[in-house]
Image (cartoon, rainbow, N blue to C red):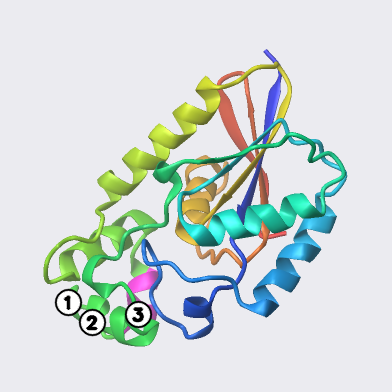
C-alpha cells in the first residue's frame, strides 16, 4: 500500500479565542485577524493537490477550510466533508466561561493550587478526566468518550481511501490535534499548545501513523 499524508490545520482565531473563553462545542466566527492568518496558511499549502477535505461540523472549521481552499491551485471540484467526530472536546458547563476562571475551578476541584501545577502533573488523558470531574453536571467529555469518537473519525477517513497515495486536509481543533500528536508521536511530548491556523503533518503507511511535524 502507498502513503496517506494527513495535513491537520487548527481553525483560525475566533472571537471566543480572542476573548479568552472556553470554546468546545460552542462556536463563534473567525476574527478578521484570524482570517488573515488562515489566508497565509492557505498560501503555504497552495501547491498541494488534496484528494479529500474534511472539517468538523462546527462553523469555525468550515470557514477556515473555505479560506484555505480559496488559496489552493488545485481546488476544482473539491467538496468539504463535515464529520462531527472531529469536533473539539466538549467542556460541558464550562463552555463560554473565561479560561482563567474555568481552569482555576478545574484545578482546585482536582486538588491542585492552580492550572500550571495541574498541567505539570497531569498527562492529557488525566486533564480531560479532570474537566469531566470538575463539571458540576459532569457533561464534559471524559478521555474515553473523546478519544473514542476521534478514533471513529479516523476510521471513517481511512475507510474512504480511493488511491494508494493521497493528500488529505483535515481542519479541526486544538485539543483534537494535540491528542493526535501525543497519540502518534514516537517521542514523548511534555507540553503542546496548537496555534490557530498552524499546520501539523501526520503520515499513514503500512497500517501505522507517524508524526512528521506539528505547529508549523
Quarter of the image for residue 54 reads top right
Considering only order in the chain, which callout, 3 or 2, is on the residue closer to the N terminus?
Answer: 2
Q: What segment is highlighted magenta in the picture?
A: 114-120
- Label 1 or label 3, whichever comes before in sequence order: 1
Looking at the image, residue 36 lies above or below residue 52: below
Element under label 3?
Answer: helix
Q: Position of residue 2 (x, y in %)?
A: 71, 17
Choose mark 2 or mark 3, whichever is in front. 2
- Where 87 falls versus 83 (above or below)? below
Q: Are marks 2 and 1 in contact (CB under 8 Å)?
A: yes
Q: Position of residue 104 (x, y in %)?
A: 29, 84
Q: Residue at x 66, y 60 (%)?
A: 215
> Toward the viewer: 157 or 117?
157
Looking at the rendered structure, which numbered label has been put on residue 105? Answer: 2
Q: Residue at x 67, y 78 (%)?
A: 32
The Cα–Cα distance between marks 1 and 3, rounded to whole angstroms, is 11 Å
Q: Residue at x 33, y 64 (%)?
A: 122
Q: CA distance from mark 2 to mark 3?
A: 9 Å
Q: Kindly check if marks 2 and 3 are in contact, taking CB atoms under 8 A apart as contact.
A: no
- Residue situated in front as seen by the camera: 178 or 110: 178
What residue sits right under mark 3 in the picture? Answer: 115
Looking at the picture, tell me which residue is in the foreground, 185 or 6. 6
Circle 1: element type = helix
Q: Estimate how packed mark 1 is, as few (under 14), some (14 to 19) or many (20 or more) residues with alpha carbons within 10 Å.
A: some
Amino acid at each position: 500500500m502507498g502513503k496517506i499524508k494527513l495535513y491537520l490545520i487548527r481553525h483560525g482565531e475566533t472571537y471566543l479565542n480572542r476573548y479568552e473563553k472556553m470554546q468546545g462545542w460552542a462556536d463563534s466566527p473567525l476574527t478578521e485577524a484570524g482570517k488573515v492568518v488562515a489566508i497565509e496558511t492557505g498560501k503555504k499549502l497552495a501547491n498541494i493537490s488534496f484528494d479529500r477535505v474534511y472539517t468538523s461540523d462546527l462553523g469555525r472549521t468550515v470557514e477556515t477550510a473555505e479560506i484555505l481552499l480559496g488559496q489552493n491551485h488545485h481546488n476544482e471540484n473539491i467538496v468539504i466533508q463535515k464529520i462531527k467526530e472531529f469536533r473539539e472536546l466538549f467542556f460541558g458547563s464550562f463552555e463560554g466561561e473565561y479560561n482563567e476562571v474555568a481552569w482555576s475551578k478545574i484545578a482546585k476541584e482536582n486538588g491542585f493550587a492552580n492550572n500550571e501545577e495541574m498541567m505539570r502533573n497531569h498527562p492529557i488523558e488525566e486533564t480531560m478526566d479532570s474537566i469531566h470531574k470538575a463539571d458540576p453536571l459532569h457533561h464534559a467529555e471524559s478521555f474515553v468518550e473523546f478519544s473514542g469518537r476521534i478514533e471513529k473519525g479516523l476510521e471513517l477517513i481511512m475507510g474512504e481511501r480511493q488511491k494508494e497515495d493521497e493528500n488529505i486536509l483535515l481542519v479541526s481543533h486544538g485539543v483534537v490535534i494535540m491528542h493526535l500528536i501525543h497519540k502518534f508521536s514516537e517521542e514523548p511530548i511534555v507540553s503542546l499548545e496548537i496555534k490557530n491556523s498552524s499546520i501539523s503533518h501526520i503520515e499513514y503507511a503500512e497500517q501505522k501513523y507517524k508524526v512528521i511535524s506539528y505547529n508549523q
